[in-house]
Image (cartoon, helix red, strand yellow):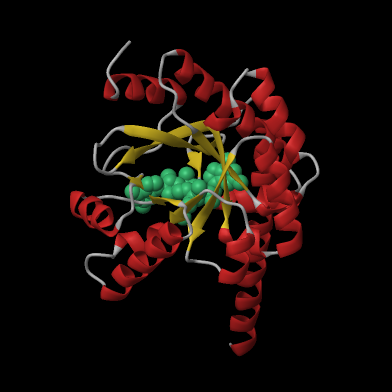
Amino acid sequence: KAKHEGRNRYSFFSDELESALMHRHQLESLVRSALKNDGLEVHFQPKYDLASKKIVGAESLARLKDSSGNYVSPADFIPLAEESGLIIELGRQVLLNTCAVAKRLAQLGYRIPISANVSAGQFCSVELENHIKTALEENELSANLLELEITETALMLDADLTKTKLEQLKKLGISISIDDFGTGYSSLAYLKKFDVDIMKIDMSFVRDMLCNKHDYEIVKTITSLGLSMGLSLVAEGVETQEQNDALLSLGCGTGQGFLFSKPLPVEDFVQFVSKANGGL
Ligand code: C2E
Ligand code: MG
Ligand code: MG
Ligand code: MG
């Protein structure tokens, strides 16, 4: 009997491993073919001035559909794209899409900056600078309408390289935002040396800031740190009016989250901005 159970257990783990590998392989093929066949989608989530409730920016977010038409989470396919090297091409396409949409809005009279997420591997790559230049040039977009979001963790991987890279990117005229601030191991000493413009307070602190004293204190501390360093602050994951008001009173001027809008497909997003900011 024991032997029987043992065999079952063995085959259970084996199946599990096999299906995990299958899934990985399928997902990688999905990313690869989307990149080849214009199948990558980019959605856009507006950022709001928390006081005036005006749209003051947006973030682009990669989206991918599987063969049954369901969206796969970027939390699954971005790390995989990163490991397989596909992130460079994925990032290039995201940058082109982001600049194209920023240009469309500018032409409609809405000159708001749009940020694109840049992963660690992309940030370190030698191609990034050219991909940015090309995306700006092809869309005749002025560089001050493009921002990059780089996670705190990615920035801290190699401080010397980060410093050089940031100087190179800042010369192009774009702005840099530290994404998911507070979740990584940041050295405050390095932070002072990096030429960044915006700090994004991670959603995990915003979520419970009104029911958890510690989260509230963390949001408060990040905000005052950012402000004292001359940075703008953006809160992620703002879901309630109470959070909006608390953030505002702490000095965080900008937010994005389901209170305002989910990330939207391009056409919906352009319409949404036009309606919200009056016009068309
Ligand atoms: P992120 O850059 O921190 O993006 C914010 C995430 O929070 C997005 O998830 C967004 O849909 C979600 N979100 C926004 N507001 C709310 C809210 O009020 N409540 C909740 N619960 N969630 C909210 P998404 O689109 O699933 O992306 C997850 C992560 O995947 C991103 O985190 C980013 O790290 C990565 N990612 C997405 N697109 C790209 C991309 O084009 N390139 C790279 N390198 N990474 C990307
Ligand atoms: Mg982001
Ligand atoms: Mg973030
Ligand atoms: Mg986050």
Say whether residue 124 is left or right of residue 251. Answer: right
What residue is drawn where x is 33% and y is 24%? Answer: 272
Picture coordinates of residue 264 (x, y %)?
Answer: 40, 31
What residue is drawn where x is 46% and y is 24%? Answer: 266
Does the rendering let one see residue 186?
no
Does the rendering let one see residue 76?
yes
Residue 230's place in the image compared with 53, above or below, is below
Picture coordinates of residue 47 (x, y %)?
Answer: 38, 39
What residue is drawn where x is 45% and y is 33%? Answer: 44
Q: Residue furthest left?
A: 242
Say whether residue 20 is left or right of residue 233. Answer: right
Residue 274's place in the image compared with 227, above or below, is above
The N terminus lies in which quarter of the figure?
Answer: bottom right
What residue is drawn where x is 71% and y is 64%? Answer: 159
Q: How many marks?
A: 0
Q: Residue furthest bottom?
A: 2
Observer-nearest of 97 and 250: 250
Picture coordinates of residue 90 (x, y %)?
Answer: 67, 37
Observer-nearest of 71 and 132: 132
Image quadrant where residue 15 sits: bottom right
Picture coordinates of residue 191 (x, y %)?
Answer: 58, 63
The C terminus lies in which quarter of the figure?
Answer: top left
Q: Residue furthest top?
A: 280
Residue 171's place in the image compared with 191, above or below, is above
